[in-house]
Amino acid sequence: MDDTAIINPPKRIIDLVNLKKLGYDLDIALSFDIVPVNFAHKSYEFQAYIFLCGYSGMINNTPFAFRKCYAKGCPNNLCPHVSQAVMIANRYLKRDYKRFADAGIFIKEIFFSLQDMMVKYDGVDIEKDAATGGILTIHDYINIAKEGNEVEVQVGLEIIPAVEHFANQKNEQTFFMADFNITTLGRNSQFQRCLACFQTDKESEEKPVALVTANDRLKILYKEFNEANIQFKTVFFN
């Protein structure tokens, strides 16, 4: 495969899968980080922990790198508890490992752990609800709809500025967030997903790419909603 055929570097899992299908030679390395982040949401601020997986390596002889946010956890009630977020992140990560395997890309399966949180952030109450079972993701509700149950989803989109705190530096990021309010089986549930982000001080350069990535991920979800006959209204970032 001619290296010059790589026009756009991969930014999503599906980009890597598609390159594999086109015959490219992929060498992929994973790195994991759990980062405390200060979010500025409307009129208030709060701290959360985001679960990041960095994908990097070579496509033929061309290097690539991107990261994906798998979950956001809070030690308060503003988003899923940190212990629940670990399980949510690992469920989404398991789905991506399967997508890789189905495409003939075999990666050693590594997951986020509560132990890592305890080591890195002593004093954070992560044991709360740690044994909670039945942590559902948006795809569980898609499956509930496929079983013939009525499911309604209201989608709300926000672009939220934040500051990531790494070991020796701070990193200002802006996140494309989607809120999913779900009604089914007599219950209401809420999920929030980070669909893309960009470095705040590089807005003119990185925001257009992040916006396309976020909307592409929404299109994939909406397609799954339609296939499961889920009631919803299509909205996109602009």
Image: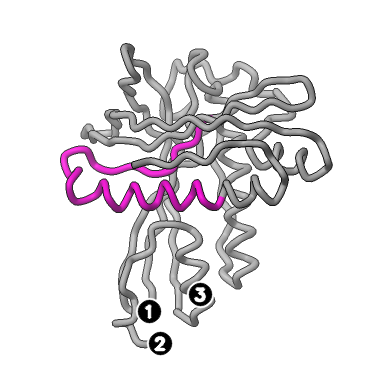
In the picture of the structure, the residue carrying the numbered disc 1 is 60
Please identify the dominant SS of the magenta region.
Answer: helix
Give the camera-side residue of 185 and 69. 185
Q: Earlier in the sequence, mark 3 or mark 2?
A: 2
Contact, mark 1 vs mark 2 (Cβ under 8 Å): yes
Residue 8 vs residue 145: left or right? left
Quadrant of residue 6 in the image? bottom left
Say which mark, if any, is on residue 195.
Answer: none
Quadrant of residue 166 in the image? top left
Q: Which residues are magenta?
A: 192-220
Pointer 2 local density, CA inside 10 Å: few below 14, some 14–19, many at least 20: few
Three-letter residue code for mark 3: Lys
Q: Give the Cα separation between the discs numbered 3 and 1.
A: 11 Å
Three-letter residue code for mark 1: Asn
Q: Earlier in the sequence, mark 1 or mark 2?
A: 2
In the picture of the structure, the residue carrying the numbered disc 3 is 20
Question: Which residue is drawn at the image coordinates 60% and 16% (left, top)?
Answer: 128
Position in image of residue 15 (x %, y %):
45, 64
Position in image of residue 205 (x %, y %):
19, 51
Secondary element under disc 3, as helix, strand or loop, is: helix
Does residue 182 lie above or below 196 as drawn? above
Q: Residue furthest bottom?
A: 1
Position in image of residue 29 (x %, y %):
43, 61
Say which mark, if any, is on residue 1.
Answer: 2
Q: Residue 207 in magenta?
A: yes
